[in-house]
Each structure stands twice: as C-alpha cells, then as structure tokens.
Image: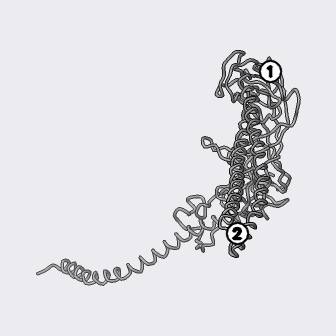
Amino acid sequence: MQHPASAEKEHKKAHGECKRPHVRRYVMAALPVLFLLLGIVGYQRVMSWSGSAENAHGSSAVSITTSSKQKGPAGPQYGRSGPPKAEGHNKQPAVKARTIRLAVYQPQWNLYGEVITGHRVAVHLPVSGRLVHVSPKLREGAKIKRGDLLAAVDEFPYRAALEEAQATLSEIQARQKEIGGQITLEEHGLKQARRQLEPAQNELKRMQKLFKGGTVSQKMLDDAAVVVSQRESALQQRQSNIEISKARLQQQEAAEKRQQWGLQRARRALEDSRFIAPFDGRVLSVSAETGQYVTSSSKLATLVSSGDVEVRFTLSEDQYGDLLASGRAISGLPVAISWRSGRTLLTFDGEVKRVAAEITEESGAITLYAELDEEGLLKDQLPIGSFVDVTLSGHSISQVARVPESAIYDQNHLFLIEDSRLVSRQVEPLTWENGEVLISSGLYEGEQVLANHLPNARPGMQVKVIAQ
C-alpha cells in the first residue's frame, strides 16, 4: 500500500506535466510579436540618429525624434541628448574678392637681339688681273664713302679689248654704207633699164605689123626682138643685184648689233677692273694687297652699310600670338634698344620693319627685324654683331581687366560674387603676366571676382568675403 505523502507528490507532478504544453504554445506564439516590436524600436532609433546627422549637413531628409531618456550611444550616459553634430558644414567659406577695374593695356616684352646690317657686301672683281691699286681706306674697321675707289687691276688688256671692239664696229658700219651706196646705184640703173625697155617693145610691135604687110624682112623683125630680149635681161639683172645687196646689208646690220653688245661687254670689263664703294659704311675684313693676282672668285674684302643698321630678335609663338591679339599690323611697332659696353650705355629708338616669312624649325620662334631711327656718330659706334636688350611695345588695348591666376578655372572660367553667392562666368583671357591674367572680354566695371581658388567652388555656393 502506497504511502499518502508519496501519492500526493505523484499527483502534483502529473498535474504540472499537463500544464507545461499550454505554456510553451503561448510563448512560441508571442515570440514573433516580440521580435517585430524590437525591430520597430531599433528602426526608429537608427532613423533618429540618421535624421540628426543629415540635418547637421543641411539635408532635407525627415528625422525621427526620440526621447531624451532613450538609452544607447545617444543616451544620457554619454553626456548628450542626441547623436553627434557635424561641425563646420553650416559655415560659409571665407574668401577674397577683387573689384574689377577696366583700363587701357599696352603689352611690353623684354627680349634679346643682335645688331645686323641690311647691306653686307663681299667684294669681288668680276675680271681677272694683277692688283695695281689698293686704297688706304681698305683696312679693317675703316669707314668708307660711296664712290671711293677701293681696288683696281691692270686695265691695259681691257682697254685694248674696248678699242678693238670699237674699231670692228666702225668697220661694220663702213661696210653698211658701201652696200647702201651699191643699192642706190642699182636702183638708178633699174629705172634706166625700164625706160629703155619700153621703146624696144614698141618697136618690136611695129615690126610685127609691117612684117605681116610684107613691108619689112624677117631679119629686121628678128633684130627688133633681140633688142627687147637684151633690155629685159638688163632689167632683171638690176633687180637681182638690188636683192643681193639688201641681203648683204641685213647681214651687216646683224653684225653691227652683235658688235654693239661686244663693245658694251668690253666697256663693262674695263669698268669692272675698278671697284668703287657702293655705299657709306665700314670695312669688316680685308684680304687684298697690291701686286696680288686675283680672279672673279677671289674675295678682296667685306663691307657693311652704316646707313641700314637693324636689330634682329625673336618671339615665341605664344608671344607672337599675344602681339596679334590687337588685330593690327606689326610693322611700325616701337622698340627701344640698349647696349652696354663697360660703363657706357647707348640707347636707340626704332620700329619693327618686317617679320620673317617662316618659323625657325629648331626653336619654333618667329624672327622680327627692327630698324634704328638715330643717325650719326653714336649709331656708327654700335658694333655689328653686338647683343642688345630689346623692349617691344605692342598696340594699346582698351577695356582690359586684371585678375589673379588663382581666379581662373579651366583656362577661361571664373566666379563672380553676387549677394554672397558664386556666379559662373566665361571670359576671354588675353595673356598671363606676372601672376595675373588679363581679360579682354566678359567682365564689367565694378563686378566682384572670387580671387582665391576654392577646390569645391560651384554656382550658387554661399561665401563670406573677408578681404578685397
């Protein structure tokens, strides 16, 4: 028999095992609801933090406000009532500005050049011979005047050739006169032959009529015919002689023309036996001495003109493009030339005379030539080949603005400041000069330009001007 206490324990255990399945079903049914509630609370917490951060950056995203008593990273245990705020995003960037002032701009370029001369002559005598005269002025560095006799070879053979050519020409002209006289004589004889032929022909006609009438004999008719034949032959001979004489005359006329050219060549050879200075100038080098035998290929000296001193200098393609920006001619632009030798400084004014026709292949430069204005002693003392400083002034350009290089974006854009906001503007840069950009169009008097470079600059961005 079972003890009563043991029976009571077994009854309670059996009763508990009967309740346990019902509790498990309740718990399993409540778990999804519990997970859903926890997800909603977590989503609200995340959206609350995200909304606070976006508002700090100026975003228009909707934020979910949570209670100040909430726990987690934004709870009171962290010493703040919400997520951390982004610092500095609501501040306007401090910038520098420049007020536009339009002015006239005359570009200048400081360059280097070389003194050259427009006329450089290598002295050669076109004829051969022995030098019998070398002028005392034909010395290196000496000054010469136009018309000075500088050198001469023995002229005897050239003068003899000239005299012979003149004599031959005279002989040809005499033959022409002789032939002309013969033609005149033959023409006179031709007229006489025509006059004699006509009566003979009339007499022959009369004899022919009489012979038919039996009045004259056959011999008388034949004699009249012979006379006509003889006179016709004489007429034809005169005509032939005239034609032959005219042909001979044409030959002599052609010979005269050839001899005229020969006479001119002989006269030119005589002139070429003497070298006369063609201009005022100076002697660069000399290689001629009295008694020296020279030919047409022998170089006697080198002369330079003192009246056509020029300065040759070059511009880069960019500089040349800037020079063309005005749209006006380059010839006539003023230049200032300075040359220093020890303590002596020579200065000259001049102007551009011409531009070389092609670009230098090695450097890609464009060569310009300027002619000096001054005349006289100082100009003559400027040595050929000297290196000089050249200041070239371009044409004046009106309505030009200056902005710092830092204001330019993408080569041709900048930002204006209007009501503390940036406005993009496309401009036309003229040139870059000493850290500044010269703008020829696109800006107006009094406008404010963003002077310092902002990496994140964009139209509509608010800025704060702290310096002009």
Picture quadrant of residue 335: top right
Residue 403 in percent (x, y) is at 77, 52
* 452, 283: nearer the viewer: 283
Residue sitting at x 74%, y 38%: 111
Please state which amino acid type lies under the numbered disc 1.
Answer: Ala
Above or below — where is 396 with respect to 124? below
**In front here: 418 or 234?**
234
For mark 1, does the 10 Å Cα neighbourhood hold few (<14), some (14 to 19), or many (20 or more) residues?
A: some
User: Which percent across, then down, holds residue 120?
Assistant: 74, 32
Q: Nearer the viewer, mark 2 or mark 1?
A: 2
Res 442 label: none
Amino acid type, residue under disc 2 in the picture = Val
Mark 2, residue position: 216
Residue at the image point whose x is 63% and y is 44% from the top:
364
Residue 191 can be seen in this image:
yes
What colour scheme was applied to this rendering of the protein? one colour
- The secondary element bearing badge 1 is classed as loop
User: Which secondary structure lies at badge 2?
Assistant: loop
Residue extending furthest toward the left: 1
Q: Residue at x 74, y 40 (%)?
A: 175
Spot the residue most to the top. 291
Q: Name which quarter of the figure residue 375 lies in.
A: top right
The residue nearer to you, when weighing 141 against 93, is 141
- Nearer-the-camera pick, 159 or 360: 159
